[in-house]
Image: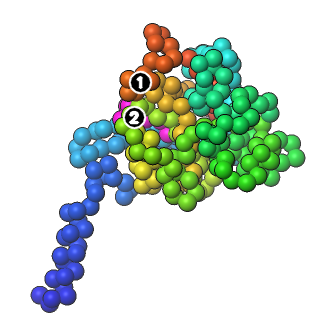
Amino acid sequence: MRKSALIWLFIFCFCLFSAPWGWAEGQDRGVPWKELAPGLAFYRWPVKSGTQLLDTIVLLRIKPDQWSFKVFYNSNPKTLQEWQQTTGAPIVCNGGFFQENFRPAGRILVGGASFGPLRNRSMKGMFLAEPKKGFEQNPKARLIDLRDEGVEETMAQYEQGIQSFPVLLDPKGQVRVNPSSFQANRTVIGQDNQGNILILATEKPFFTLYDLGNYIKKMPLGLTFALNLDGGYRTQLSIQLKNFKYIQAGTGETQEAARFFFPEGAVKLPSVIGIFPRGGST
């Protein structure tokens, strides 16, 4: 064998056996989406280390041209099931962070009405949906970076919105969160390069925010933006369609925040995101 061939063989073997498989296992394949309805797809992505299942990330991909988004808020919080019953939304997930008095920690828009502080420097990104009259040319749903210029003008053009933090993945591919040891269930709202909105929810309290940001960066989702929503026990997702049902509730988080709200009962949420088919049929 020629010397150059030996060199290339060595390089190939080195790359093969030194590849960081770990959590990246299986990420060279695409997502085998299950279509639940037109414009709506679902998959449970296994997070593995070797053969060990560490967590599962629920993925919900939504086409805004076919599904609408509404933010709901009430200072008298409700369980996710109560929210689903009162709103009639076939899909409901938890919203952003809130304070002890159940006031939003960041600004939310509910049918054009604003709740919560007009400005909170802790908030880093915002999900917006349903352009107001006169702005129909805008994307029906999008995520924005609150450090960009013109965000106030952009927010004023939408009926629905919710601020949160941190930005797990920005359009430049940067993970904008520092490492920590705080593991919990996580809820993430993101946008891909096709304009789809994605909801991600972890089924176990495995990920830190830093680790989750780096993990979803490697997933074959085409994400251009990913924003963390509230998590821990407040990670909540319910899908109730005619031919498909799924419910996920956060199961844990590290002790310093584990039972900050509702230490002995069902977790209640002051705000949620409801998702509706634009045609009215599920």
- The residue singled out by tag 1 in the image is 256
Of callouts 1 and 2, which one flags the residue occurring earlier in the amino acid sequence? 2
Q: Residue furthest left?
A: 1
Residues in magenta? 200-207
User: Residue 189, image x and y in percent?
Assistant: 56, 41
Q: Amino acid at mark 1?
A: Glu
Relative side of 254 to 171, left or right = left
- Residue at coordinates 86% horizontally, 42% vertically from top-left? 133
Total marks placed: 2
The correct choice, above or below, for 61 with respect to 106 in the image is: below
Q: Quadrant of the C terminus?
A: top right
Most prominent secondary structure in the magenta stretch? loop
Q: CA distance from mark 1 to mark 2?
A: 9 Å
The correct choice, above or below, for 79 with respect to 219 in the image is: above
- The residue singled out by tag 2 in the image is 182
Report the disc number at residue 119. Answer: none
Contact? badges 1 and 2 (CB < 8 Å)? yes
- Residue at coordinates 51% horizontally, 56% vertically from top-left? 174
